[in-house]
Amino acid sequence: MRKLVGFLMFSMMTLSVSAQDLIVTASRDTIPCFITKIDSVSVEYQIVKNGIREKNTIPRRYVSDFKIAERNQNTESPENVEWSKPQFTKFRWSFAPGYAGRWGKDVESSGHAQFDNLYKKLKSCFSWETEIQYYFNRGNGIALNISGVHSSASDRNVYVPEYGQALQCKLKQQIIYVGPAWATRYENDHWLFSGCISLGGVFYTESVIPDHIQLKMTTVAFGMNYGIGAEYKLSPNWAMGLKIGWIISTASNFKAGGQTFKTDDPVSLSSFFIASYFSFRTQ
């Protein structure tokens, strides 16, 4: 009798192993299991741990492939099996506030150290960037990139060229970039790495404000934006991460007071930034 029970137990274990299914995740990990249901949203499966059968579910976009073992008449078959292609995230939106530093040479000395020092302070900036992305497949897509760099500095009793002594003087600079982009990404169950390169327009504004009188200079130039980032998935839709990026552009033609003038040497409108960000993904 003991031999018969032992033989039956061994037969059941052999059958269980032979009928075992396999899930391959997007990060190429494998999950030996028993698949009970597959649809366009998720895969439901069971595994045995310490003699206890556990039920689990994995989102379909995290599944690269799956294999269902042959089953005999005494083995339960998966219900509602749909052999559609695994889903992937098509839309992604991110917003990244951070720190930016201006590139390029210092402006020519005005001969007044206090005024020149104000200009140097404008090289440290506040930055922000937002991207709206649409992916054709798991790795490539298109995007709209909008980013900005803002800085200001002020001081009292400053001599301002072309104006004179000012009780208070404030300087402001603003760079806005807008352009279409090509986006790439790689992701696994927990992390997403992304890159984006864009060509578009750079809108530059500089203001000198002595004693509340605003003197403004503007220009529009062609530029490039490039950024790379890494984010940790907090949920199937939300994530947080870090990224670095660059805006590269120069300009020679400016408008001020209704007049257009050209500088002897191109003025750098370039900057780099580092930022933390959050993102939202949806199918």
Image (cartoon, rainbow, N blue to C red):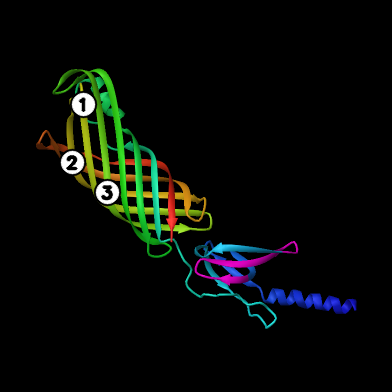
Per the model, the C-alpha gap separating discs 1 and 3 is: 27 Å
Q: Amino acid at mark 1?
A: Ile
The image shows residue 235 at horizontal and vertical percentages of: 52, 53
Q: Which image quadrant is residue 24 in?
A: bottom right
Which of the numbered marks, if any, corresponds to residue 219?
2
Per the model, the C-alpha gap separating discs 1 and 2 is: 18 Å
Residue at (29% x, 27% y) in the render: 153
Q: Earlier in the sequence, mark 3 or mark 2?
A: 3
User: Which type of secondary structure does the marked residue at label 1 adopt?
Assistant: strand
Which of the numbered marks, if any, corresponds to residue 209?
1
Give the crowd class for mark 3: few <14, some 14-19, many >=20 residues within 10 Å.
some
Q: Which residues are magenta?
A: 35-52
Q: Which residue is mark 3?
A: 178
Q: Which image quadrant is residue 259 in?
A: top left
Position of 165 compared to 191: left or right? left
Residue at (80% x, 75% y) in the render: 9
